[in-house]
Amino acid sequence: MECNKCGAEKPLTEYYHFRGKPHGKVCKPCTRARITNERNENIEKHRERDRKRGYREYDVNKTKARQAVRRLARPEGCSHCGTPGKVEGHHPDYDQHLSVVWLCKPCHTAVHF
């Protein structure tokens, strides 16, 4: 099947398909590029819609800090109470991505509330 956007000949698996409807006429990469471009051109409109839907507030520093924590080695216990087990990363300051305090769930909750 030929894509109406890029003109490339691709198998049906490269086109989105919805039950009860025929296969699309634009391939998946072209569809994704169109959606990404449309979102980037109207980013504030999309962020406002996301806020109304209840999605988290967009914050670049928080996102980068969370991504940095995923790559760090976690200690065996809470740095506040010493309880062994699963710990969560807490950022006292999101501008310092690697400055993390490792807390158990009860201590982490207590810090925020």
Image (tube, rainbow, N blue to C red):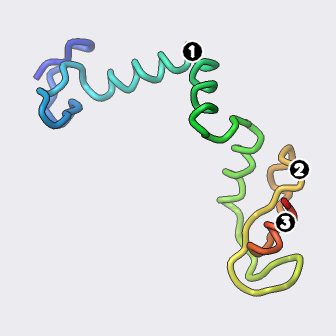
Q: Which residue is mark 2?
A: 93
Element on which disc 1 rests: loop
Check the picture and name the quadrant holding the N terminus: top left
Which residue type carries mark 1?
A: Asn
Above or below: residue 1 compared with residue 42: below
Q: Position of residue 107 (x, y in %)?
A: 83, 73
Camera-nearest residue between 8 and 60: 60
Classify 10 Å Cα crowding around label 1: few (below 14), some (14-19), many (20 and above): few
Q: Is 7 situated left or right of 75 in this image?
A: left
Q: Which residue is mark 3?
A: 101
Which residue type carries mark 2?
A: Asp
Q: Which residue is mark 1?
A: 42
**Marks 3,2: beta carbons within 8 A:** no
Q: Which of pointers 2 and 1 indicates the residue nearer the eye?
A: 1
Camera-nearest residue between 59 and 30: 59
Choose the circle earlier in sequence order: 1 or 3: 1
Q: Residue sitting at 61 percent across and 39 percent down?
A: 54
Q: Position of residue 71 (x, y in %)?
A: 66, 59
Q: Quadrant of residue 83?
A: bottom right
Q: Residue sitting at 71 percent across and 58 percent down?
A: 69
Q: Position of residue 53 (x, y in %)?
A: 57, 35
Give the Cα distance between marks 3 and 2: 10 Å
Q: Residue sitting at 33 percent across and 23 percent down?
A: 31
Above or below: residue 66 compared with residue 52: below
Give the Cα distance between marks 1 and 3: 37 Å
Classify 10 Å Cα crowding around label 2: few (below 14), some (14-19), many (20 and above): few
